[in-house]
Amino acid sequence: MNELKLTQITKQFGHQVILDDINLTFKPNTIYGLLGRNGVGKSTLLNIITNRIFASSGTISWQGQALTGRDHPVQAFYLMSETNLFSKEERLQKIIKNTALLQGQFDETLSAEMMTAFGLNPKKKLSQLSTGYRTIFKAMLALCVPAEVVFLDEPILGLDANHREMLYQFILKAYEERPRTIVLATHLIEEIANLIEHVVILNETQVIIDEPLETVLAKSYRISGPEEVVQAYCQELNQLATEQLGTLYIAYIYDQLPTEREIPDRLTIEHVDLQQTFIKLTNERGNRDV
Ligand SMILES: Nc1ncnc2c1ncn2[C@@H]1O[C@H](COP(=O)(O)OP(=O)(O)OP(=O)(O)O)[C@@H](O)[C@H]1O
C-alpha cells in the first residue's frame, strides 16, 4: 500500500531541537493540511521526507519499507517548495521538458490547461515571472508529475484571491482525475480548510493534532456565559484558552462535550472554525496535551 510512515523523527540544527519525536502516517489518496506557525518546522519536515536534508534520528517508511538515503523513491514523492531548483534563466517550456524527463509520465494536458488558464507564456524565462506567477508555475509542475505523494509548501505564496481560487480548483481537479496523497503545508488556514480531509498541526517541535478535519471541527467549541456557569460546565473539559469580554466569559474547548450533562440555560455553545482552533491551539497558552 502507498503509505508513507514517519517514526520518531527528530531534527536538530546545532543545539536547537526543531522536530522532536514526530510520528505520522500519510495514507494514500488523501489531502492533508500540514499546519503550523511560522518557523515551527514544516519545511524542515518536508525536506527530510523528500531526502533534501537528513533527520537527526528516526525512520521513514514507504510501502512498508524503511528508506535509507540511497533508495529514496525519487519519483514517488515530489516537493514543490520555495527554494528554486531551476535556473532562473531557463524558459518555462524547457523546465517543463526537463521535469517531464526526470519525473516520467507528465500530465501534458493539465499542464497546458493550467498554463492557458493562468496566462503563462511558456517562452518566458523563470526570472521574468512575478512571485505569484512563479508560485503558480511551480504548483503546476507539482500537480502534473506522476508522484504518489505531492508536498505543496506554501502553494499560495504571493497569489491574489482570484488566482488562489483557481489554484484550489486545479488541485481538486488533479486529485479527482488521479487520486494521490497531497500535503498542503501552510499557515494560511482559512481557505485551505475547504480542501483538506485530514489535519496535522505542528507546534513547538511536536505534532499536537493528527485527525480527520471532521473530527477536529466536531471537537472545537466556544462556550460563553457568566464566568461561574462556564467554569462549572467546562471543569473537566480540555480548555485551550479563556477570554473575558465585559461580563461575558468565554472558554475555547477542544473536546467531546458530555452528552449526559444538561446544558445550563445561560450558556451559549457554538462550534468554531479550523482557523480559530488553530490559533487557540498554537498560541503560547495553547494546551499541548490534547
Ligand atoms: N539549515 C538550517 N540551519 C539552521 N536552522 C535552520 C535551518 N533550516 C531551518 N532552520 C530553522 O528551523 C526552524 C524551522 O524552520 P522551517 O523553515 O522548517 O519552518 P516553517 O514551519 O516551514 O516556517 P514558515 O511557515 O515560516 O515557512 C526555524 O527556526 C529555522 O530558522
Image (tube, grey):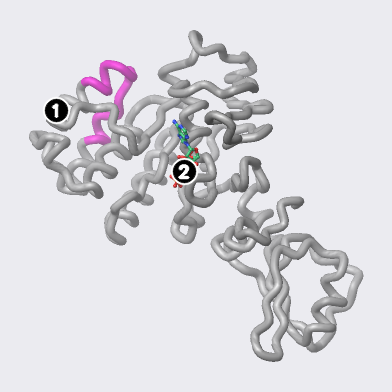
First in sequence: mark 1 vs mark 2: 1
Q: Is residue 177 left or right of residue 183?
A: left
Residue furthest to the top in view is 70
- Judge the density around disc 1: few (<14), some (14-19), many (≥20) Cα neighbours within 10 Å: some
Numbered label attached to residue 240: none
Q: Nearer the viewer, residue 18 or 277?
A: 18
What type of secondary structure mainly makes up the magenta span?
helix
Residue 257 lies in quadrant? bottom right
Residue ID at (49%, 56%)? 189
Q: Which residue is mark 2?
A: 184
Residue 95 % position (x, y): 20, 26
Q: Is residue 106 magenta?
A: yes
Residue ID at (63%, 22%)? 57
Q: Nearer the viewer, residue 149 or 236?
A: 236
Residue 55 % position (x, y): 56, 24
Does 275 sit above or below residue 148? below
Q: Which residue is mark 1?
A: 90
| Amino acid, disc 2 | Leu
Residue furthest to the bottom in view is 247
- Judge the density around disc 2: few (<14), some (14-19), many (≥20) Cα neighbours within 10 Å: many
Q: Is residue 274 magenta?
A: no
Residue ID at (58%, 65%)? 276
Element under disc 2: strand
Q: CA distance from mark 1 to mark 2?
A: 27 Å
Question: What segment carries the magenta color?
Answer: 98-111
Q: Nearer the viewer, mark 1 or mark 2?
A: 1
Q: Is residue 90 left or right of residue 108?
A: left
Residue 8 % position (x, y): 68, 27
| Amino acid, disc 1 | Glu
